[in-house]
């Protein structure tokens, strides 16, 4: 692969971070953590509480949590693997913040997620409007994926 690759991810509990680290290694990619300006507490992440921060964000289509820092030179990357935990059957709203913060014209975006039980569902169609000039390529839920299975997946994408 001669493409310059970035693995950008948001991880609330560390599960997605572990997967992103392995993915960056096998894809020979740079790694960037999407960190919220205001970190999530365990109370914020309590999906059973209708008043928790994550529940309120996911129920508000306009929610765009602020991000702490930016990718220094997004223009240098050809491919962006974008990872996150599945919340309410889709990507957390901070992923929309990330996508709307850059020009992804002509870039390939590959979604990957970790999930306690659901797949990607309609995540790609929900995120596409946030990066309308990007080329989205085959996303995947990578719970507990091994280095060899991630390497095979990356190779199968023919980036």
Image (cartoon, helix red, strand yellow):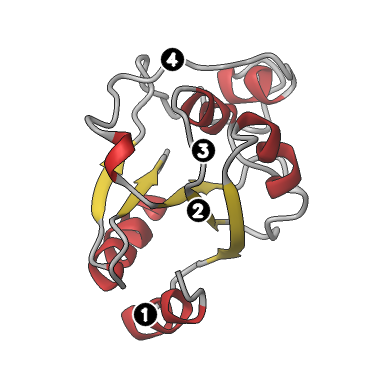
Task: Looking at the picture, tell me which residue is in the foreground, 79 or 36.
Answer: 79
Question: Decide: marks 2, 1 in contact (CB < 8 A)?
Answer: no
How far separated are the C-alphas under marks 3 and 4?
Answer: 22 Å
Mark 1 packing: few (<14 Cα in 10 Å), some, or many (20+)?
A: some
Q: Residues within 10 Å of mark 3 (few under 14, many from 20)?
A: few
The furthest residue to the front? 106
Helix, strand or loop at label 1? It is helix
Residue matched to label 4: 66
Rounded to the nearest angstrom, the CA distance separating label 2 from label 1 is 18 Å
Q: Crowding near pointer 2: few (<14 within 10 Å), some, many (20+)?
A: some
Whole-percent x and y of residue 92? Answer: 58, 34
Q: Earlier in the sequence, mark 2 or mark 4?
A: 4
Q: Residue 138: name its quadrant.
A: bottom right
Q: In terms of depth relative to the viewer, which is nearer, 60 or 6?
A: 6
Q: CA distance from mark 3 to mark 1?
A: 26 Å
* Residue of label 1: 151
Asked which secondary structure carries label 3, the reply is loop
Q: Which mark is residue 108?
A: 2
Q: Closer to the camera: disc 3 or disc 2? A: 3
Whichever of callouts 3 and 4 sits on the residue coming sooner in the sequence is 4
Q: Earlier in the sequence, mark 2 or mark 1?
A: 2
């Amino acid at each position: 692969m001669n493409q310059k690759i970035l693995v950008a991810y948001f991880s609330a509990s560390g599960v997605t971070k572990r997967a992103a680290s392995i993915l960056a290694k096998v894809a020979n990619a740079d790694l960037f953590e999407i960190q919220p300006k205001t970190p999530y507490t365990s109370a914020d992440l309590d999906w059973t509480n209708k008043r928790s921060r994550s529940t309120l964000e996911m129920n508000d289509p306009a929610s765009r949590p602020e991000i702490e820092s930016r990718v220094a030179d997004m223009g240098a990357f050809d491919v962006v693997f974008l990872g996150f935990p599945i919340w309410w059957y889709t990507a957390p709203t901070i992923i929309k913040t990330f996508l709307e913060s850059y020009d992804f014209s002509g870039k390939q975006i590959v979604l990957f997620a970790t999930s306690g039980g659901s797949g990607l569902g309609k995540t790609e169609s929900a995120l596409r409007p946030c990066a309308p000039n990007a080329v989205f390529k085959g996303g995947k839920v990578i719970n507990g994926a091994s280095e060899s299975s991630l390497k095979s997946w990356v190779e199968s994408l023919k980036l």
